[in-house]
Image (spheres, grey):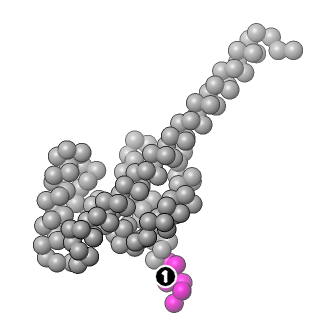
Amino acid sequence: MLNKSELKENLAIEIKTLIEESKQQVSIAVNSTMTMLYWQIGKKINNEILKDTRASYGKQIVVSLSRQLCEEYGNSFSEKNLRRMMQFAAVFINYEIVVSLIRQFIGGFGSGWSEKQLSRCLRFADILVLKKLSLHCGEN
């Protein structure tokens, strides 16, 4: 039989476990949502603004868009990050594939993330891009 002190300690441990598990679930949900957002932004830029071309005006559009987004949402939408989002969407053009890849990989990235969500998500996108490129190289 447990005494009052041991009961309190067990209760605290169980509650701390619930809190940590919930924090991890929230982190996974946020990270997968943000990764999908970055893919959608890249796809929208590629498809609607640049029309899948590399026209000279395309660079100006991305620079201008980046300035507008950075003013309202901060440096997470720098030109460099927008281009990474575009690359992510260019390599993974199918929505269902992106969803599947996020489900496959996001669990390993969900715990222990810092506040730099964009950086982590974009690194995740880079990993996906590299994995896709290596799969293509392996097929040749």
Is residue 111 visible from the viewing direction of this image? yes
Query: Residue at position x 13%, y 76% from top?
Result: 56
Q: Examine the structure image and report whether residue 135 is included in the region drawn in magenta.
A: yes
Q: Is residue 31 above or below residue 59?
A: above
Residue 31 on image: x %, y %: 45, 49
Q: Nearer the viewer, residue 112 or 101?
A: 101
Q: Quadrant of residue 79?
A: bottom left
**Residue 132, image x, y percentages:** 48, 74
The answer to whether any part of residue 127 appears in the image is no
61 or 126: which is nearer to us? Answer: 61
Residue at image position (37%, 61%) is: 39
Q: Residue at x 20, y 49 (%)?
A: 70
Q: Which residue is mark 1?
A: 136
Asked where in the image residue 87 lies, by quadrant, the reply is: bottom left
What residue appears at the point 26 percent right and 76 percent down from the top-left corner?
52
- Residue 2 in the figure: left or right of residue 104: right
Label 1 residue SS: helix
In the image, is 8 to the left or to the right of 132? Answer: right
- Please provide the residue range marked out in magenta: 134-140
Is residue 99 shown above or below 72? below
Q: Residues within 10 Å of mark 1 (few under 14, many from 20)?
A: few
The amino acid type, in three-letter code, at marker 1 is His
Residue 129 horizontal/vertical position (percent): 43, 70
Specify the farthest residue to the top.
4
Q: Is residue 12 within the magenta segment?
A: no
- Please give the count of numbered marks on the rendered protein: 1
By secondary structure, the bulk of the magenta-drawn segment is best described as helix
